[in-house]
């Protein structure tokens, strides 16, 4: 027992920064799950034009606070299901659409 190290600030291993993405909620019909569409703008390697590409991510929303059309920030996490590898961090901006 004397050899055990107690967690002190100098020997606690730091976790790396988690990847964050910002996108728009396209579906909030599932329980505790939202679908977030993230649009990335990259420059085309040959034509040097800005090309927008979209990808959708399944994110865990424990409290069910995100609604359709909201702009949200998601962070990477451990696999929660077959498709869910992200979780909701915060709602950046509420949608102005009336249900």
Image (cartoon, grey):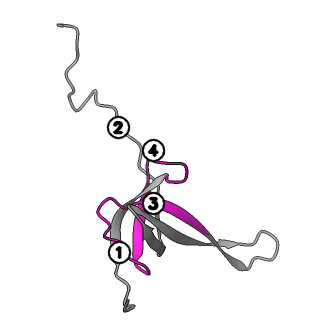
Q: Which residue is mark 3?
A: 59
Which residue is labeled 4 in the image? Answer: 78
Q: Is residue 43 above or below residue 1?
A: below
Mark linked to residue 14: 2
N-term-proximal mark, 2 vs 1 = 2
Would residue 89 appear left or right of 4 to someone viewing this image?
right
- Range shown magenta: 55-84
74 sits to left or right of 37: left
* Pick the front one: 81 or 92: 81
Q: CA distance from mark 4 to mark 2?
A: 17 Å
Rendered view: 13 above or below 49: above
Q: CA distance from mark 3 to mark 1?
A: 15 Å
Question: Which dot marks residue 92?
Answer: 1
Q: Residues within 10 Å of mark 4 (few under 14, many from 20)?
A: few
Distance from the alpha carbon under mark 4 to that under mark 3: 11 Å
Other residues around mark 1 within 10 Å, as few (<14) / some (14–19) / many (≥20): some
Kind of element beneath mark 2: loop
* In the displayed structure image, the side of residue 58 where residue 17 appears, left or right: left
Q: Residues within 10 Å of mark 3 (few under 14, many from 20)?
A: many
Task: Give the image quarter of residue 29.
Answer: bottom left
Q: Mark 3 or mark 2: name the one nearer the start of the chain.
A: 2
- Of residue 31 and residue 20, the one placed in the foreground of this image is 31
Marks 2 and 1 sit apart, C-alpha to C-alpha, by 27 Å
Sequence-wise, the earlier of marks 3 and 1 is: 3
């Amino acid at each position: 027992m004397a050899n055990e190290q107690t967690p002190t600030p100098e020997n606690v291993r730091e976790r790396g920064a988690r990847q964050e993405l910002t996108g728009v909620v396209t579906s909030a019909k599932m329980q505790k799950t939202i679908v977030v569409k993230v649009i990335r703008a990259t420059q085309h390697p040959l034509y040097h034009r800005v090309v927008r590409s979209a990808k959708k991510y399944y994110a865990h929303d424990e409290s069910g606070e995100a609604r359709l059309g909201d702009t949200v920030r998601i962070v990477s996490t451990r696999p929660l299901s077959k498709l869910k590898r992200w979780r909701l961090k915060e709602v950046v901006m509420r949608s102005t659409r009336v249900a």
